[in-house]
Image (spheres, rainbow, N blue to C red):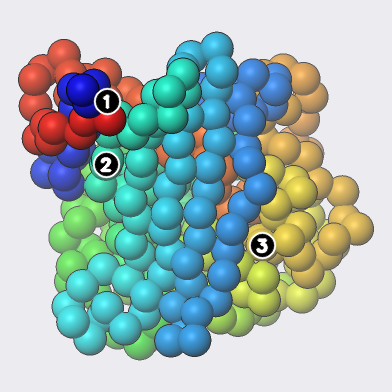
């Protein structure tokens, strides 16, 4: 006779209702802690370019002490834009580590968006100058919006946000998405016509684009600036110009991974420190006034899995989601 078990499905709307900004921030912080202290494992990464021009990847891992095991299958399908769809697609699957049985399927787009925004927020809190007032954002898509929103929430001193769009035109959807946080904090929002000029006037720069090439000139970055580099997540991709990393203090979510997939692939020998080392106190970083800092963000599996486990616990407690019979 089959054993009667059930599989929980959590769709986009349910995930959004159960996972807030503060939840994502704490889940990301915990993921960095687990990763740095060796309490969680990230398994070998899969990242493959497809014949269609899309990219498909799998990030997997587990935390034995917390009964967490799973993976996120995700990638980038640029053709989705022509279908008025999101080019980033992701699905998360959690397993019972004792039996190998699937326990939960989750819309990974919501988790990816929030956990990446939260990781960027932690980078800003630890690396950017506290007196920063001017922010420049490259990109206007989903990730650019969430990065900007976390920045506005976590850096109350920001008074100016300029953004650079791919087509060089103002983006009403981007401005509407960040309007609540910007207005509530007295931060002016404007479209930037000149890339180098926008960078040169900014204390914090966030790059969240498809990462097909350098977005600005290296000498445009002012001393004391901080950069969150989000878009380079595949071999061959970059957003930052050559020569910039060599005069920066470089940090990453995972150093080895960043040297394969992130901005650090273009400066493999340059010293790089894991952000988790700072968050856990294993390393100390004192910012000098003229330091240029870069946080190279390629994303780690534990960021997805800690957020997914929280969603599973909350959905079960709230009796929400869709249960499917899954006998074995």
Task: From the image, state whether disc 1 or disc 3 is nearer to you.
Answer: 1
What is the quadrant of residue 270 in the picture?
bottom right
Q: Which SS class for mark 2?
A: strand
Q: Say few, some or many: other residues with alpha carbon within 10 Å of mark 2 (under 14 / 14 to 19 / 20 or more).
A: many
Q: Say few, some or many: other residues with alpha carbon within 10 Å of mark 3 (under 14 / 14 to 19 / 20 or more).
A: many
Q: CA distance from mark 3 to mark 2?
A: 25 Å
Identify the residue at image location x=20%, y=33%. Answer: 326
Whether residue 229 sits left or right of residue 256 in the image: it is left
In the picture as drawn, the residue positioned furthest to the front comes out as: 1
The vertical placement of 213 against 11, above or below, is: below
Tell which circle, 1 or 2, labels the residue nearer the N-terminal end.
2
Q: Which residue is mark 1?
A: 312
The vertical placement of 324 against 281, above or below, is: below
**Which of 223 and 218 lies nearest the eye of the viewer?**
218
Tell which circle, 1 or 3, labels the residue nearer the N-terminal end.
3
Q: Which numbered marker is on residue 261?
A: 3
Residue 222 in sight here: no
Residue 77 in sight here: yes
Q: Position of residue 196 (x, y in %)?
A: 57, 77
In the picture as drawn, the residue positioned furthest to the right comes out as: 269
**Which of 78 and 288 lies nearest the eye of the viewer?**
78
Tell which circle, 3 or 2, labels the residue nearer the N-terminal end.
2
Task: From the image, state whether disc 3 or disc 2 is nearer to you.
Answer: 2
Q: Position of residue 144 (x, y in %)?
A: 38, 60
Q: Are marks 1 and 2 in contact (CB under 8 Å)?
A: yes
Q: Which residue is mark 2?
A: 106
Identify the residue at image location x=32%, y=71%. Answer: 87
Q: Say few, some or many: other residues with alpha carbon within 10 Å of mark 1 (under 14 / 14 to 19 / 20 or more).
A: many
Q: Position of residue 104 (x, y in %)?
A: 28, 33
Q: CA distance from mark 1 to mark 3?
A: 30 Å
Q: Are marks 1 and 3 in contact (CB under 8 Å)?
A: no
What is the quadrant of residue 75 in the picture?
bottom left
């Amino acid at each position: 006779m089959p054993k009667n078990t059930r599989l929980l499905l959590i769709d986009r709307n349910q995930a959004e209702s159960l996972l807030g900004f503060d939840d994502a921030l704490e889940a990301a912080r915990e993921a960095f802690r687990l990763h740095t202290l060796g309490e969680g494992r990230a398994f070998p990464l899969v990242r493959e370019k497809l014949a269609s021009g899309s990219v498909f990847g799998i990030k997997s891992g587990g935390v034995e002490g917390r009964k967490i095991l799973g993976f996120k299958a995700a990638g980038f399908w640029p053709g989705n834009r022509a279908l008025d769809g999101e080019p980033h697609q992701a699905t998360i699957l959690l397993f019972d580590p004792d039996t190998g049985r699937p326990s939960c399927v989750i819309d990974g787009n919501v988790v990816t968006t929030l956990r990446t925004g939260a990781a960027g927020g932690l980078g800003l809190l630890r690396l950017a100058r506290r007196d920063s007032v001017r922010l420049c954002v490259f990109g206007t898509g989903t990730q650019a919006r969430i990065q900007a929103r976390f920045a506005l929430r976590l850096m109350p001193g920001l008074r100016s946000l300029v953004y650079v769009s791919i087509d060089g035109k103002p983006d009403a959807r981007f401005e509407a998405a960040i309007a609540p946080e910007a207005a509530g904090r007295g931060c002016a929002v404007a479209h930037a016509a000149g890339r180098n000029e926008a960078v040169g006037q900014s204390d914090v720069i966030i790059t969240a684009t498809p990462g097909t090439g350098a977005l600005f000139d290296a000498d445009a970055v002012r001393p004391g600036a901080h950069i969150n580099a989000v878009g380079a997540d595949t071999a061959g991709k970059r957003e930052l110009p050559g020569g910039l990393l060599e005069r920066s203090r470089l940090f990453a979510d995972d150093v080895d991974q960043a040297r394969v997939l992130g901005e650090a692939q273009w400066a493999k020998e340059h010293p790089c420190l894991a952000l988790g080392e700072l968050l856990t106190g294993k390393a100390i970083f004192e910012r000098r006034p003229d330091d240029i800092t870069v946080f190279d963000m390629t994303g780690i599996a534990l960021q997805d899995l800690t957020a997914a486990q929280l969603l599973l616990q909350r959905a079960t407690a709230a009796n929400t989601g869709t249960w499917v019979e899954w006998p074995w």
